Amino acid sequence: MAGIFINYRRDDSPGMAGRLYDRIVHKFSRRDLFMDVDAMKPGIDFTKQLEDHVAQCQVLIAVIGPHWLDIKDQSGARRLDNEQDYVRIEIASALKRNIPVIPVLVDGAAMPKEASLPVDLKPLVRRQALELRYTRFDADAETIVHALEDLVPRHRLPWRLVGAGAAVLVIVAAVAMLWPKILPRPEPKTPAAGKTTTITSNVPAATIRPETPGVPATPSAPAAAPPAYATQSRNAIPVDGGMPINFGDTYDKISAAYQTYQQPEPSPWDKTTTWLYLKDLGIEFFFDASNKVDAIHFVPPWAGSIKGAKLGETAEEIKGVLGPPAAVDERFGGATTALIYRWPYTVTVEFHIESASGKVGIIMLD
């Protein structure tokens, strides 16, 4: 059962709630989080299910946006005044059970006054609130994650490991992380000559068409040089200007290319894979079971572009540069909308538009 319960209202702050979920799940497993009422089982009492979920969590995050207090239902009544309102049920249940509740104020919201809250929510005002601002998302989200680490014990490793091999793997992981501190750091490895997978655009245009028996070869019109990512291989990453890392590369190449000794960690999504987050660059590398790069995410402060499309742009701006997407997919109950592009000979690229800001908050390549 989830140890962290994220409480939010779809009409108030779904974008920031979804983005916060993404950041928290990097440190904790998905099985440790419960966020959306869409996960509720049909045919079972709604209120009881919510209370049961809350009862088994270790901390509840109450995401509070600018309109959280005053949002009304179709009849014009304030939702918080309805005893069946799911936001009220969840928070009240946590408060009644003395479960830690962290109010997270987004988009400039302020803590509500005690007099404005229903009786069962009044204790909320005595909980220390944290801010989550769009302009300081990374720093604010990190503060929230640190608070959660103090409240939710980190016991994720054992369930990933089986039998007697668990202790061995833990020791190996610890040695791997401490090794650079025990011994002098070696010079970063440089990819061997001729082994680099970086693709350049200096490809000569084809001038001869295939020969046909009995017909002399005839020069054809020169073709324009393809961009850096134009290749008939999934390994191509369509980043403007190219990247020193491609799909299929190993951690050693990342370490050499980005001059980092930061070690990959167990992936929050799949126990057979690992994940490396270069925070200062805004790049996340995901490794498959063979320890090769299988997916890449770009988040702020990454300042690059994909065929001219960048983080922080609106859906209209993305479509204006790239044209209509191959598909559109809503995530987290509409908290984010993914514009999905699939170009010939390249990877699938998703631009995730946050509902709250209307701008791209993350770019995913896989």
Image: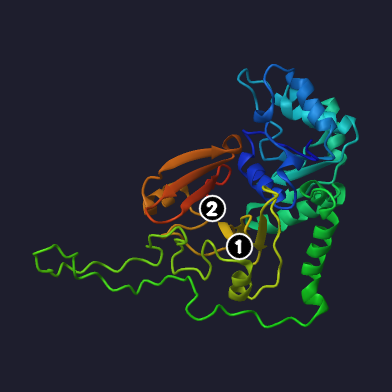
Residue 170, how many percent across, how many down? 82, 59
Relative to the observer, which residue lies in front, 329 or 207?
207
Q: Which amino acid does label 2 sit on?
A: Met
Residue at image location 40% in from the left, 43% down from the top: 326
In the picture of the structure, the residue carrying the numbered disc 2 is 364
Residue 351, how many percent across, how many down? 50, 50
Residue at image location 71% in from the left, 68% down from the top: 262
Relative to the observer, which residue lies in front, 230 or 176?
176
Q: Helix or strand or loop: what does disc 1 sit on?
A: loop
Residue 62, how many percent across, how many down? 76, 39
In the picture of the structure, the residue carrying the numbered disc 1 is 282
**Quadrant assignment, res 354:** top right
Q: Is residue 82 visible?
A: no
Mark-to-mark CA distance, 1 and 2: 12 Å
Which quarter of the image is occupied by the N terminus?
top right
Residue furthest to the front in view is 213
- Decide: is 122 above or below 337: above
Q: Helix or strand or loop: what does disc 2 sit on?
A: strand
Residue at image location 77% in from the left, 83% down from the top: 184
